[in-house]
Each structure stands twice: as structure tokens, then as C-alpha cells.
Image (tube, rainbow, N blue to C red):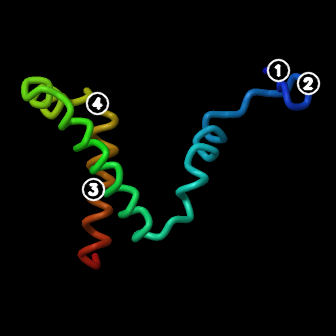
Amino acid sequence: MAYDPASGFRRPLPSERELIREEVADVVGLTPSERAELLALACRSGAQLLALRSEDERRRILESRDPVTAETERALARLRARYRRRISGG
């Protein structure tokens, strides 16, 4: 239970699923075009931030990769395969 300052009562904590739904609520209904605009904006912002760094820092940042679990690798492979089937009409 967590204290809810708006109501003054304690209430159950939201589930992870509920938290994720809240987090993505603003983008769930976007069109592909709107999503592309957001992606382009994020890429421009990232490029601007990188431009402020030294060449060595930029190289280090661009070469870094977050480690992923084998389970995540398998999930990504499934998603990529599903996407490829969808765009190829299969």
C-alpha cells in the first residue's frame, strides 16, 4: 500500500503492467507518421547532444551497447521475424 497525497488515503500500488500503460498512454494512439516525427525529433536531439562532446567521448558513446539477456535476444529475434513476415506479406 502507498500513501496517496491527493486523496489522503493509502491505496494499493499499481502493477507493473498498469505503470507501463500509464507511461505509454500518450503515444499508443499515434499514427505511424506521428511516431516517425517523434523518432526524428529524438534523433536530432541525440545528435545535438553528441555534438557538444569531444570526439573521444562521442566515439565511446556511439560504440557503447547495453548488455541484453539471452531471453531478450530471443524475444527480439521473434519480433524481427514477425515484422519481416508482415512487411513481406507472408
Marks 3 and 2 sit apart, C-alpha to C-alpha, by 45 Å
- Are the two marked residues, 4 and 1, in contact with CB atoms closer than 8 angstroms? no
Residue receiving disc 3: 80
Amino acid beneath label 1:
Tyr
For the point 58% across and 41% down, the residue is: 20
Picture coordinates of residue 7 (x, y %)? Answer: 91, 30
- Are the two marked residues, 1 and 2, in contact with CB atoms closer than 8 angstroms? yes
- For residue 25, above or below residue 13: below
Amino acid beneath label 3:
Arg
Marks 3 and 1 sit apart, C-alpha to C-alpha, by 42 Å
Picture coordinates of residue 40 (x, y %)? Answer: 31, 57
Picture coordinates of residue 34 (x, y %)? Answer: 44, 66
Amino acid beneath label 4:
Val
For the point 26% across and 36% down, the residue is: 49
Kindly report which numbered mark, 4 or 1, lies closer to the viewer in this rendering.
Answer: 1
Q: Earlier in the sequence, mark 4 or mark 2?
A: 2
Q: Earlier in the sequence, mark 1 or mark 2?
A: 1
Which image quadrant is residue 38 in? bottom left
